[in-house]
Amino acid sequence: MSTPLKARISVPRSKDLEVNGVKYNRSSSRRNNFEMFAWLFMRLSGVVLLVLVFVHLYVNLLVEEGGVHAIDFGFVGGKWANPFWQVWDLLLLWLAMLHGTNGLRVIIDDYAEKDRTRFWLKVFLFVTSAFVILLGTLVIFTFEPCPVGADPALLASFCTAA
Amino acid sequence: MAKTSKGTLYRGQAHGQWSWVAHRITGVAIFFFLLVHVLDTALVRVSPEAYNAVMETYKNPIMGLGEAGLVAAIVYHAFNGLRIILVDFWKQGTRYQKQLLWGALALWLVVMIPFLIRHLSNVFGG
């Protein structure tokens, strides 16, 4: 259902814009600032993600001899043995998932017209996102670069060093 | 659309409607990739063999081209995102939004050309 038109349209401005006695002011006291924070979050996380993602791609696809073909268990083990890359990838995971989930939320709100469709699509989105964020976090923190009994040829070189 | 229509200030304009459409499409594509990317990386927690087996299935020219497309989408989304931030926060942003789009696309080329040379030679080279 469409939102009923309001006599007062409000905008988040420090000064009210008043035309012919009508305040064009988007922040009415009955609504919270969630959408404004979501908007701000997209911009702030976007800038941080640009740096996180570009370095991620550079290190994983370009630096190694063979690029993308060099990615295997040993490569991941070598990176995540270093707390720096654990924190890097954790930030990347959380910011990218929240940024993407909010983007999808906005798209669902834009195109799904029925209330029930919108509701269930968003439930599905939030459950999926929560699962992926928690799984990724668990993997980063519980990862064992040198699992006992594994074929040493598949592991990072430091696993077999005396 | 009628052929006399030249669009509006926004509709049908590269720096208006189309850059926005491309931002949405690349955003959705990156998000779905991200879900798969976290799930396949989670296989490191299963066993080295399981992770390596899945990575091996990615190491072919078709996936290599897919990776090139993914990076192209990410770099567009990143630079057009910076343009959106400038339009929102920089005083002159709305005035120069058209030039900002050409700037974003130029930067996209500057990043993509060396990337593609290196990546595609890894994918198609020995």
Image (cartoon, helix red, strand yellow):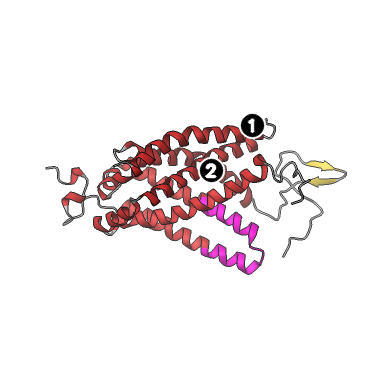
Marker disc for residue B38: none
* Quarter that holds the C terminus of chain B: top left
The amino acid on which the numbered mark 2 sits, given as a three-letter code, is His
Q: Which residues are magenta?
A: A100-124
Q: CA distance from mark 2 to mark 1?
A: 17 Å
The answer to whether residue A121 is magenta is yes
Q: Secondary structure at mark 1?
A: helix
The residue furthest left is: A162
Give the left or right position of residue A112, taking residue B46 as reference: right
Residue sitting nearer the eye, A84 or B46: B46
Give the left or right position of residue A108, taking residue A93 as reference: right
Q: Chain of mark 2?
A: B
Residue sitting nearer the eye, A104 or B119: B119
The answer to which of marks 2 and 1 sits earlier in the sequence is: 2
- Residue A35 position within the rendered picture, expressed as x and y whole percent measured from the top left: 63, 51
The answer to whether residue B71 is magenta is no
Is the residue under label 1 in contact with that under label 2 (CB below 8 Å)?
A: no
- Residue B49 position within the rendered picture, expressed as x and y whole percent measured from the top left: 24, 57
Residue at 74% in and 60% down: A3
Can the viewer see residue A5?
yes
The residue where tag 2 is placed is B77
The amino acid on which the numbered mark 1 sits, given as a three-letter code, is Gln
Q: Chain of mark 1?
A: B
